[in-house]
Each structure stands twice: as structure tokens, then as C-alpha cells.
Image: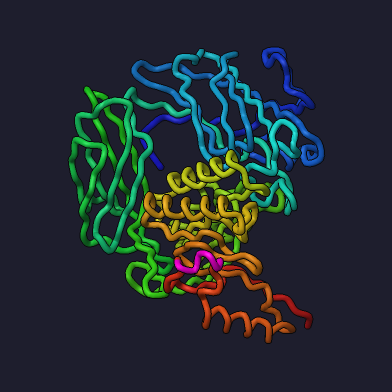
């Protein structure tokens, strides 16, 4: 999202250190190292993958307060538990490794400021049991790659008016010819104006309202698709007792649906040709190396005929979604999983899923979301756990009708309960296992209901059939 709000970027070199136990008095801490932000700590200090540490960050910044302006300290993502202090005062804490969060700092700003952050990322079952928190393929059992810790996305300060727009939700439909917007403010507004602009900045449609929900009819717009990733600027302006705020968001008009066993993009048949993207990088791990690096990777995939990215068991950096919009790649997001189902972990997982969708709903590239992958962290033979998954799918479908959901992207030995897609993973596509591959695909095609758990086969409908993971290996 873009706006006219002033920002101070806090990325760059920070003072840094690691401690075996939590410091008793942060005011006395004098860090002896430095680290880049954003970055995964493991890139520079691999000892954190073997031993438990508290990670300490510090930097100073100057900021002159302006009259009638509020200031917010914003974090893209920090893994996992972090406490934030400004000028000796605790701003608060955040739990979770994937979502953005912020604190208002208006009343604490000085001419010269000291920002301190303490991060704890569990690698065992001590302070926090890492088996019961959503972590994906980092941490946990097995640890597929490496742990991820610290400030792995950007940090900045944003200046806003006294009454400002937040929690903006956008859903743009090509087939319905409309864009629906809802938003929140801290005070009542006098009015709002929603305007759709083309890429030249010319107005396509505009509407005034006095509520926090606006339904804007549009005509003559072009749909977003991998072949033609058409994008538009949506501008929302509000006023409240003489105070004004403005947000500009880039979006596209798209409808992704299922009907009679088919996938439809903007009302036309669509065939997914995708890759499973782990979104780990050789040197920077979780952190995207650069816009140029990721953009070139996406363009190479497009040249290979790929039209879909299945982003695997983590929440992508916002840049990932921006580039998918621009270059024209559908994104299928998987939620990060835990190893062991628990009431607390399941609540945090649902919070993570909702947070990811709310953050990315305006992206036309976001089309599919998997709640669970291959039954990792959940026992679908347990009635309570299976019931939780079925309820969550119903809740998400009701709240986000423009997204296609799969309950459990299934593999051999586990099944679906209730899903928009009947997808399955077949790891038998090598030349030397051709007969097995043919048998599995024939079974999948002829008896798709058998890929649902027996007790839930009443939920089976004519969902699209999709081989959502396979691998090919052979000898010359």
C-alpha cells in the first residue's frame, strides 16, 4: 500500500548481541556486535541453530514531532516472540513469526531516541514449546532447512494524521464489475471518496460515501490474469473534522472460482501449471535478496510456461505478492504448520491464516489457500482435531468468499474432509515407476471420493481434481 504519509526507514546496521538468559536490565546492555536489518540471524550467527539465545537489537534515531501528527513504529515480521522498548519504556510484545505489527510511539518520541528489541525464538521445549507453534519448514521435527530468527523483514516509522485509515479490506470482482472496500478509523468520519485510476492516472470511476463501507461499480476495466496482469490504482480519501488521510492501493479485477469440477479464472476454464516454491534463499534464507533477484526468478518461471506459485508453508514477504501481481503469477499460499496440535497452537494458526489473508486480499494474484499440508501437525482420525479443521474451513469460506480453500493438501496416507479442491500429492512420477503413476492417476480420476476420509465423504462434491505435488527423478 502507498500513501502520502511520511516514513522513516530503520533498515540498515543495528547494534546486536546474543545472551544465554534474558537480561535483567536492558538499560545496562551494551551490545558488542552489529547485524543487518532485515536479515535472519542464522545468516550471520549460525550458533543460534544449536543453542538457545535471547537476541538483542538496538539502534538510535532522530525524529522531530509535528503538531497534529501521530507516529507508529511498524515491523514487517519478527520471528518469534519479541518485546519492544523505546527510550526505556516498554511498548509491548508480539508473538508469531510471520505477520506485521505496530505500536504507537507518539507520546514517547524525543529528539534523540533509543530503540531496543529483545527477541526469543524457541528451539526446544523450555520457555516455549516449539512443537506447538506454527513454524513451517524451519525449526520443528524434522527441521527441513534451518531455524529462522529475528527481524527478517523491514522496520519503519510512519507518520499519520490524528484520524487515519486502517484495516483496509479490498475485494475487486471483474465479473461483477465492482470493487468493495471496508475500513476502520479511530473516530467518526465526515465523508470518504473512493476513486479508481488507470495506470496513466485518469479516473475510471469515483464514489462519495459517509460510511466505512463503499461499493464502487466500474465498467470498461480489463481483468487480471497471468497472460494480461492488468493493474489499477485505488485511492481512498477520508475527512474527519478537517483532518484528512489518503491511501493508494494497487489492485486488479479477478474472479477465481470452481464449478462442475473445473477451475475458472474470470469465467473461463483455467489449468494450473505450477511449482512448489519453498521461498528459501541460499544466502538470505527467509529474507528476499532484492526486488531484482525475485523478479527475475518469476520471469524465468513465466518463460517456462508456469502460471502458478504454490508458496509453501510460510507467509510470503509482501514484495513476493507485489511481484506476482506485476508479472502475472497466481499464488496459492500454504499456512505454516506446527508439529503437535494444541488449543493454543490452533488458535495462533488461525490468527496467522487470517492475518495473511487480510494483509494480501487486495492482491489479484492471491487465489488459493491451504489450511493444512499433508496432515502435518494434525491427526484427522481424532474427532476433535478433524472437527476443528472442518469448522475453520467453513469460517474462512464465509469470511473470504473470493478465495478457494483446501482443508488438507493431502498425500498418501491422509485425506480430505471438506474442500474446494480435491488435490493430492503423488510422489511416483519417475520413469521407473510409470505403472504405479498410471494406476494412481486412474484411481484418482475414476474414484475421487475415495480421497476423502470415510466419515466425511458426504462432503464430497464434484471438486476440481488437482495433482498439487509430484516429483520426477530418474537415471540417464
Q: Position of residue 425 (x, y in %)?
A: 61, 69
Q: Quadrant of residue 112?
A: top right
Chief SS of the magenta region? helix
Magenta-drawn stretch contains 340: no
* Side (left or right) of 367 relative to 93: left
Above/below status of 175 relative to 284: below
Above/below status of 99 relative to 254: above
The number of callouts visible is: 0
Quadrant where the C terminus lies?
A: bottom right
Q: Residue at x 68, y 31 (%)?
A: 120
* Side (left or right) of 399 relative to 242: right
Q: Residue at x 39, y 17 (%)?
A: 66
Q: In the rendered image, is residue 235 in sight?
A: yes
Q: Position of residue 367 (x, y in %)?
A: 44, 59
Query: Which residues are drawn in magenta?
Result: 453-458
> Residue 377 or 44: which is nearer the viewer?
377
Quadrant where the N terminus lies?
A: top left
Q: Residue at x 20, y 51 (%)?
A: 205
Colour treatment of the image: rainbow
Q: Position of residue 35 (x, y in %)?
A: 70, 33
Q: Position of residue 341 (x, y in %)?
A: 63, 47
> Residue 105 or 111: which is nearer the viewer?
105
Amino acid at each position: 500500500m502507498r500513501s502520502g504519509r511520511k516514513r522513516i526507514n530503520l533498515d540498515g546496521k543495528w547494534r546486536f548481541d546474543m545472551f544465554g538468559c534474558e537480561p535483567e536490565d536492558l538499560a545496562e546492555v551494551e551490545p558488542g556486535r552489529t547485524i543487518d536489518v532485515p536479515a535472519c540471524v542464522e545468516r550471520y550467527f549460525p550458533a543460534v541453530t544449536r543453542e538457545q539465545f535471547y537476541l538483542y537489537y538496538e539502534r538510535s534515531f532522530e525524529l522531530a514531532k509535528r503538531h497534529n501528527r501521530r507516529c507508529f513504529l511498524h515491523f514487517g515480521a519478527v520471528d518469534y516472540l519479541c518485546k519492544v522498548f523505546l527510550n526505556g519504556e516498554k511498548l509491548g510484545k508480539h508473538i508469531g513469526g510471520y505477520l506485521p505489527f505496530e505500536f504507537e510511539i507518539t507520546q514517547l518520541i524525543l529528539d534523540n531516541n533509543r530503540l531496543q528489541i529483545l527477541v526469543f525464538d524457541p528451539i526446544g521445549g523450555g520457555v516455549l514449546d516449539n512443537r506447538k507453534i506454527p513454524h513451517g519448514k524451519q525449526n520443528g521435527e524434522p527441521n527441513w532447512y534451518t531455524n529462522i530468527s529475528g527481524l527478517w523483514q523491514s522496520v519503519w516509522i510512519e507518520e499519520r494524521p490524528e484520524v487515519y485509515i486502517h484495516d483496509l479490506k479490498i475485494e475487486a470482482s471483474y465479473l461483477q464489475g465492482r470493487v468493495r472496500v471496508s475500513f476502520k478509523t479511530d473516530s467518526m468520519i465526515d465523508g470518504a471518496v473512493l476513486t479508481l485510476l488507470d495506470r496513466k492516472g485518469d479516473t475510471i470511476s469515483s464514489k462519495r460515501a459517509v460510511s466505512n463501507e463503499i461499493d464502487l461499480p466500474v465498467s470498461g476495466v480489463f481483468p487480471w490474469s497471468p497472460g494480461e496482469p492488468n493493474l489499477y490504482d485505488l485511492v481512498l480519501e477520508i475527512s474527519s473534522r478537517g483532518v484528512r488521510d489518503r491511501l493508494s492501493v494497487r489492485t486488479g479485477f479477478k474472479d477465481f472460482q470452481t464449478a462442475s469440477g473445473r477451475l475458472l479464472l474470470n469465467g473461463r476454464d483455467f489449468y494450473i501449471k505450477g511449482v512448489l516454491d519453498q521461498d528459501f534463499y541460499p544466502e538470505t534464507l527467509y529474507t528476499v535478496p532484492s526486488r531484482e533477484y525475485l523478479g527475475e526468478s518469476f520471469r524465468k518461471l513465466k518463460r517456462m510456461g508456469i502460471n502458478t506459485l504454490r508458496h509453501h508453508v510460510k507467509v510470503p514477504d509482501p514484495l513476493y505478492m507485489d511481484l506476482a501481481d506485476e508479472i502475472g503469477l497466481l499464488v496459492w499460499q500454504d499456512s505454516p504448520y506446527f508439529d503437535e496440535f494444541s488449543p493454543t497452537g490452533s488458535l495462533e494458526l488461525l490468527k496467522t491464516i487470517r492475518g495473511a489473508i487480510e494483509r494480501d486480499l487486495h492482491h489479484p494474484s492471491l487465489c488459493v489457500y491451504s489450511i493444512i499440508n499433508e496432515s502435518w501437525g494434525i491427526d484427522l482420525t481424532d474427532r476433535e482435531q478433524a472437527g476443528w479443521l472442518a469448522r475453520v474451513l467453513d469460517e474462512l469460506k464465509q469470511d473470504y468468499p473470493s478465495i478457494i480453500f483446501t482443508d488438507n493438501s493431502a498425500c498418501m496416507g491422509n485425506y480430505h474432509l471438506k474442500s474446494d479442491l480435491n488435490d493430492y500429492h503423488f510422489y511416483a512420477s519417475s520413469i521407473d515407476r510409470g505403472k504405479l503413476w498410471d494406476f494412481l492417476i486412474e484411481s484418482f480420476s475414476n474414484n475421487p471420493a475415495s480421497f476423502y476420509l470415510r466419515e466425511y465423504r458426504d462432503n464430497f462434491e464434484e471438486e476440481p481434481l488437482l495433482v498439487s505435488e509430484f516429483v520426477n527423478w530418474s537415471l540417464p
